[in-house]
Amino acid sequence: MTIQENVDLQPYNTFGIKAHAKYFTILRSVGEVPKLLASHIFKNENHLILGGGSNLLFTKDFDGLVVKIEFKGIEVVQESEDEVTLKVGAGENWHAFVMHCVERNWGGVENLSLIPGTVGAAPMQNIGAYGVEIKKIISTVEAFEISTGEPKVFTNAACNFGYRESIFKQHAKDKYLISSITLTLTKKNHHFVTTYGAIKEILKERGVQELSVKQISDAVIHIRKEKLPDPTQIGNAGSFFKNPSIEAELHDSLIKLYPSMPAYTAVDAQIKVPAAWLIEQCGWKGKTFDNIGVHQHQALVIVNYGGGEGEKIWQLAMKIRDSVKEKFGILLQPEVNIIR
Ligand code: EPU
């Protein structure tokens, strides 16, 4: 493990923001964790644990140590005729891992194809797409407690998963370094989720009679490529805000004013409204401001066309938030981790 100074973070965040880390290191094996935790710089500086950098926005240089996790490995820890349990290194690329499973016809993660980022970051925000969240398949999350260096295993229940939420974003925030996740996938009798309209449409269009892990993965990849900008081409961090849940009362009054407002039932009798719709109604979709803007096919995605500054993106996000608040009385919460 070598700690470098004044490192440009642009290659390490999918927004493509130019920001510098005072210190930067890459951790390639769990064996290096004790050395990192014991290091003078780690103990005395702020630190940021980084996966694929696909869900964060640097608004300025990072005054501290950025630790990029690159623990690799996909290990079969248990296997039966029906299921396979895998322990996957936090630094594995999420999509490459999904492809590994799809190739072997292991079911459970196919709806989560093409999500950017790493395996270790996936439980932090309970990644989800097209009707599936990772909380459905995770058995445990393995981590090191930063203050003691002790290894700790979080059961699925202990992760306290919610919509784009987990204990790692709540009171365990910044207290653990996730080293791997363990999850169980099906080898047969897969539980396919095809409730999302566009998946159904594509499968119908393609004349698919018998569902397979591969066909669903292909359909998801097709939808994502159509709607979402490829972060290797246009800087972005996926959905910038969470979809808000509102009280039934507010929903009732809004639906009278906006009869076409889409809505879904969420937990605790609340109603979930797509943030993308709210943002589009406020006129932001496809708008550009110098080298940043709101994506033309998905109003929930803020983009950096090249050379955009993190602080400017944050200011744009706040303008979007304010306009939605003013028009609909709904306060959007960022989904992206803002590094201030
Ligand atoms: N819509 C608009 N305008 C738009 C886009 C969407 O009005 O520009 C409306 C439509 O009514 C559409 C609805 O919003 O039916 C939902 O849109 P979409 O299916 O594209 O999904 P989303 O709610 O915007 C969420 C996740 C995505 C995930 C998709 C598919 C969040 C914050 N985002 O987006 O996750 O891929 O569902 O399941 O929950 C991410 O987290 O970075 C991400 C991309």
Image: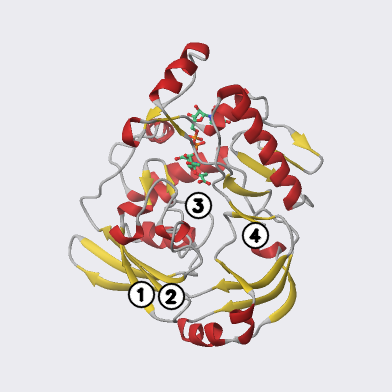
Q: Residues within 10 Å of mark 4 (few under 14, many from 20)?
A: many
Marking on residue 145: 2
**Front position in the image: 225 or 195:** 195
Three-letter amino acid code of the residue under disc 2:
Glu
Where, by quadrant of the figure, is residue 196 drawn? top left
Left/right of residue 331 with respect to residue 14 in the rendered view: left
Marking on residue 115: 3
Q: Residue at x 42, y 17 (%)?
A: 252
First in residue order: circle 2 vs circle 3: 3
Three-letter amino acid code of the residue under disc 1:
Lys
Left/right of residue 30 with respect to residue 135 in the rendered view: right
Q: CA distance from mark 2 to mark 3?
A: 27 Å
Three-letter amino acid code of the residue under disc 3:
Ile
Q: Which residue is mark 1?
A: 152
Q: Which of labels 3 and 4 is toward the front?
A: 4
First in residue order: circle 3 vs circle 4: 4
Q: CA distance from mark 1 to mark 3?
A: 27 Å
Q: Which of labels 4 and 1 is toward the front?
A: 1
Marks 2,1: beta carbons within 8 A:
yes
- SS at circle 4: loop
Q: Position of residue 295 (x, y in %)?
A: 66, 37
Q: Which residue is mark 4?
A: 13
